[in-house]
Image (cartoon, grey):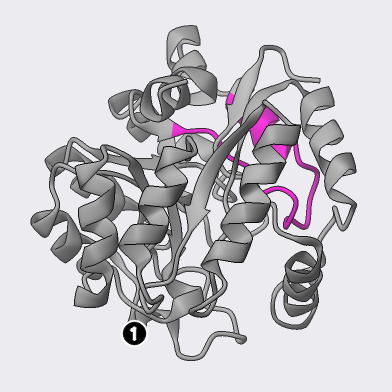
Amino acid sequence: MAEQGFIDSHVHFFPEGIFKSIWKWFDTFAWNINYKLPTDTLVKLLKEMGAERFVCYNYAHKPGISRMINEWTAEFKDKYPEVIPFAAVHPEDEDPGGELKRCFQKGFKGVKLHCHVIAISPDDERMFPIYDTIAENDKVLVIHAGSGPNLGGYSNITSAFSGAGFLEKMLKRYPGMKCVVPHFCADEFERCFALMDEYKNLYTDNTMVFSGFFPDVPGPESFLKYLVRHQDRILYGTDFPNIPYDVDTELRKIQGLSLAGEAKEKILRGNAVKLFGL
């Protein structure tokens, strides 16, 4: 149980068939997932931990499936008022901008894209109609644009279409768009925070960085100066349920840091409230 309420800003929920396919992929190319459970059970676990709200991040791994995923998400948010819905869209959909407008009219807060999955870089012109629609509607882009982790199941090495260099080109074109790059833009941590110094609409989250799962990633104390400096633009997230450790692992580490209570509250819930307009 959490010491205080929190908002989990990095959670994945999918229709059952897609969830099972993702879990099979992780079994083959990544790690053993701790929480291969029915969706209702997953929601119950988050709420019992102390989650006040939690996002629903899903993504379209190919063109033509976005509408189906988004309709599922709309039903999911209607069933659980705690859900913060995000849209799935693929840059090669027939009308990605139109699909996003439809989602935004239903109360979706933004869009989740995963450059590793779609093998398209953040600065690719195919992304521009998506960004234009996000910016015009004052929504939030969440984009996995860091090059890590480079897992064997992707169509190419991740550095071919992900990394801080690609991200910076996109930010230069869309500096006013609210953008979250998860995982501290792993594995380019220092570059991530340097970009946050320059781009005031750039946010990030701690997801998996504080888990201790990746041996080459330094401990949470090494990031303390960044947590202080960017305490207004760092979100708390877990990557639940697709994780190989206990879901409260990173929460406990954040709570144990020598960080002012106000900064912890911002990271654990306050920043999400402001960014997502809750």
SS for callout 1: helix
Q: Does residue 106 show up magenta in the picture?
A: no
Residue 244 percent location from the top left of the image: 78, 57
Of 133 and 40, the residue lying toward us: 133
Q: Quadrant of residue 176?
A: top left
Specify the amino acid type for callout 1. Answer: Ala
Of 11 and 243, the residue lying toward us: 11
Residue 251 vs 63, above or below: the answer is above
Residue 143 percent location from the top left of the image: 40, 57
Q: Quadrant of residue 23?
A: bottom right
Q: Is residue 6 visible?
A: yes
Q: Residues in magenta?
A: 235-254
Horizontal side of 263 relative to 117 (left or right) equals left
Residue 42 vs 59, above or below: the answer is above
Horizontal side of 15 relative to 194 (left or right) equals right
Residue 48 percent location from the top left of the image: 84, 24
Q: Mark 1 packing: few (<14 Cα in 10 Å), some, or many (20+)? A: few
In the rendered image, which residue does mark 1 sit on? Answer: 160
Residue 223 percent location from the top left of the image: 42, 38
